[in-house]
Structures are given as structure tokens and as C-alpha cells.
Image (cartoon, rainbow, N blue to C red):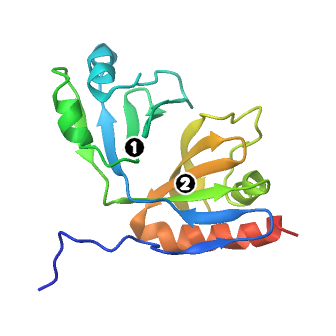
């Protein structure tokens, strides 16, 4: 019988890109889909050690942890150090729902001067720096796959997608990167 407690990371070791874009698979991280009413946010912010954002298309960051605004009462919290986010949020003592989605998602880092053009090949949003500045986050689509897009630096984006779509998203990003490199 297979040991399901140890999962092979989707896209493990995959690299791609072009002369102007680098595609890498982000290391494993812990992730929580967080839902909460506005009156719970102060307690959750304290428990998670960062300010849960309340403005559309924004994020907050503290160390290796980020909270990405996805909707009026919905966030994706990512901890690149692997902290137990469900346990942390349970200490808030406030009404909320925290679902561990760590094994559902995979992140692809798209970086370099051609990153914006690469993502624009399959994403309908305006990703210009003036419309999608550093720290911007949004649930959107890339090709036919739903993604969460997070601009971490001027020329770097984190693309969160479901692992079942990761080959498709990576392949499409790689094609777009090659086009952006010309």
C-alpha cells in the first residue's frame, strides 16, 4: 500500500522560462483557506501574527507568512516556513473557518523582466505595475485554470494553482515565457 502521508510535490524539480523569464516551483508551504466576518479579523490578525487585509486586491506579509485578500470574507494565508496555520488560527477565539489546503495547491514563481508579459499571455487582468502593484493579490484565471496571483516584487509573481492543474499551468507559462523572450 502507498504511503499517503508522504506526497511527492507536484512539479518537483521543474524549471522553465526563457532569456527574460525564470519559472521555478516554489518550495512546499502551508496554506489555509480562511473565511471570517469582519468582527473576527482583529483576533485572527493577532493569532496569525500579521494584519489580515480588508481591501480588495491587497495582501499583508510578516516574515515568511502572507495573507492574500480573495473576497469580502475570504483569504488565502500562505506560510513558506510551514507553520501550522490551522492551529494558530484556532487560538484566535473568534468565529472563523480555516481549512488546510497545503496539499491542494502548488506555487510557481514567475520572475524576471518578462514576467508580466508572460502572465499577461493567459491572464485577462491588467498586470501593469500601476494597476497591479507589488503586494497585489487576486483570484483570477490563467488560460482555463483558476489561480491566485500575488505580485511579490516588481518583476516577480507567485502563481498558486491546484496541483491537478499544475502541469497545464506550468506548460502554458513556459510557452508564454518563450514568447516573451523573443
Is residue 71 found left or right of 83 in the rendered image? right
Is residue 24 found left or right of 39 in the rendered image? right
Residue at image point 18% right, 37% down: 87
Query: Looking at the figure, which quarter contains the N terminus?
Result: bottom left
| Furthest residue in direction bottom, as rendered | 1
Q: Residues within 10 Å of mark 1 (few under 14, many from 20)?
A: many
Callout 2: helix, strand or loop? strand
Callout 1: helix, strand or loop? strand
Is residue 34 found left or right of 109 in the rendered image? left
Q: Residue under circle 2?
A: 159
Residue 99 against residue 179 in the figure, above or below: above
Residue 132 x %, y %: 69, 36
Residue at image point 72% right, 47% down: 155
The residue closer to the viewer here, 126 or 163, is 163
Q: Residue 165 has which mark? A: none
The residue closer to the viewer here, 154 or 138, is 154
Is residue 178 found left or right of 137 in the rendered image? right
The residue closer to the viewer here, 84 or 76, is 84
Q: Residue under circle 1?
A: 78
Residue at image point 16% right, 27% down: 91
Amino acid at each position: 500500500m502507498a504511503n499517503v502521508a508522504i506526497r511527492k510535490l507536484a512539479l518537483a524539480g521543474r524549471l522553465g522560462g526563457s532569456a527574460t523569464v525564470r519559472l521555478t516551483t516554489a518550495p512546499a508551504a502551508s496554506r489555509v483557506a480562511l473565511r471570517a466576518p469582519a468582527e473576527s479579523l482583529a483576533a485572527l490578525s493577532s493569532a496569525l501574527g500579521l494584519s489580515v487585509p480588508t481591501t480588495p486586491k491587497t495582501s499583508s506579509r510578516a516574515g515568511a507568512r502572507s495573507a492574500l485578500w480573495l473576497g469580502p470574507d475570504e483569504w488565502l494565508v500562505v506560510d513558506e516556513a510551514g507553520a501550522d496555520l490551522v492551529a494558530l488560527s484556532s487560538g484566535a477565539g473568534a468565529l472563523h473557518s480555516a481549512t488546510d489546503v497545503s496539499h491542494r495547491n502548488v506555487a510557481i514563481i514567475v520572475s524576471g523582466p518578462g514576467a508580466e508579459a508572460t502572465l499577461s499571455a493567459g491572464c485577462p487582468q491588467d498586470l501593469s505595475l500601476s494597476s497591479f502593484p507589488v503586494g497585489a493579490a487576486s483570484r483570477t484565471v490563467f488560460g482555463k485554470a483558476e489561480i491566485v496571483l500575488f505580485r511579490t516584487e516588481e518583476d516577480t509573481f507567485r502563481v498558486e494553482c491546484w496541483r491537478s492543474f499544475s502541469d497545464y499551468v506550468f506548460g502554458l507559462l513556459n510557452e508564454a515565457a518563450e514568447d516573451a523572450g523573443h
